Amino acid sequence: MRLKFTKMHGLGNDFMVVDLVTQSYHLDEATVKKLADRNFGIGFDQLLIVEPPTSPDVDFTYRIFNADGSEVEQCGNGARCFARFVYDKRLTNKSEIQVSTSSGNITLQLQQNKEVTVDMGEPVLTPADIPFVADNFATEYSIDVDGQTLQVGAVSMGNPHCVLVVDSVDTADVERLGPLLESHPRFPQRVNVGFMEVVNRNEVNLRVYERGAGETLACGTGACAAVTSGQLRGLLDPGVKVNLPGGSLFIEWGGEGTTVKMTGPAARVFEGQIYL
């Protein structure tokens, strides 16, 4: 069967986007892994699938698969690409789009400058709901990794995140600590790991090791989680520029009881079709 797709990226976090509203196909784990291969397939960090809505209060269903074939709950950079995709493909003429994910509904707002603002919902801080093994909520937790004790924040933005504050993202031990924390037993569903360098109270540098994908050029939910954790730890003020290897995002969070809003670009790279 011929499957049409679009290659997109949000700050270098790259995606294969598939419309399953106007075409039909079942993508299993093995097929996703094959398509993700950068030498023998299309190559991407995540596969994004657009499906029809499952309830009358949303416009689309948004599904995300990592390069290893695992389905995940949320992807912020992908959400911005999702919004541009459905609008550019004329699947909708709305500038404000409601979509459902496996972790809840989110709102996507297309801006005049072609950037997209995503209302990511409230951050989840209760350990059991992240999920993270801890007796009670704390702004910072001690966690033992490879013979050393690290201080981390734990936040879910629809998917679990672990946030470390580092002196410099350039010297952060991402390659070693990323996979060790990703599969740490205190994170029973694995975790995305953010390494955050505080530049000032309204700007940070960030690298993210994503579960199932490794380090990526940008991670939208990771940026949201890092800012949330930084504010909770008293390091940041509301309204933060997050500099990632692929570019910058602007994150706004008014504190507990409010939602996190992320603004940034989304770009189309090329259109294609593949026979499966």
Image (tube, grey):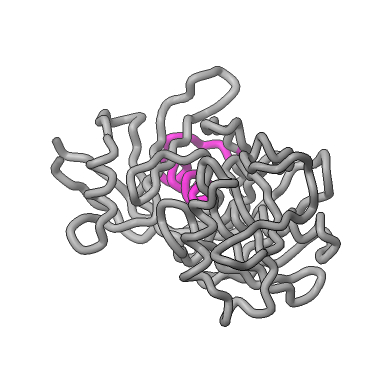
Residue 159 position, x and y percent, is 57, 43
Front residue of this view, candidates 176 and 214: 176
Left or right: where 219 falls relative to 231: left
Question: Is 89 situated above or below 59?
Answer: below
Question: Is 182 situated above or below 57?
Answer: below
Left or right: where 208 falls relative to 133: left
Residue 251 showing in the rendered view: no
Q: Residue furthest top?
A: 56
Q: Which residue is drawn at 33% across and 50% down?
A: 6
Front residue of this view, candidates 152 and 192: 152
Front residue of this view, candidates 184 and 15: 184
Q: Which residue is drawn at 62% across and 55% down?
A: 162
Residue 256 position, x and y percent, is 83, 43
Q: Which residue is drawn at 47% across and 30% down?
A: 61
Q: Give the range drawn in magenta.
A: 78-96
Front residue of this view, candidates 32 and 135: 135
| Residue 89 on the magenta segment | yes
Q: Residue at x 48, y 20 (%)?
A: 54
Left or right: where 142 falls relative to 85: right
Quarter in which the C terminus is drawn: top left
Residue 255 position, x and y percent, is 83, 48
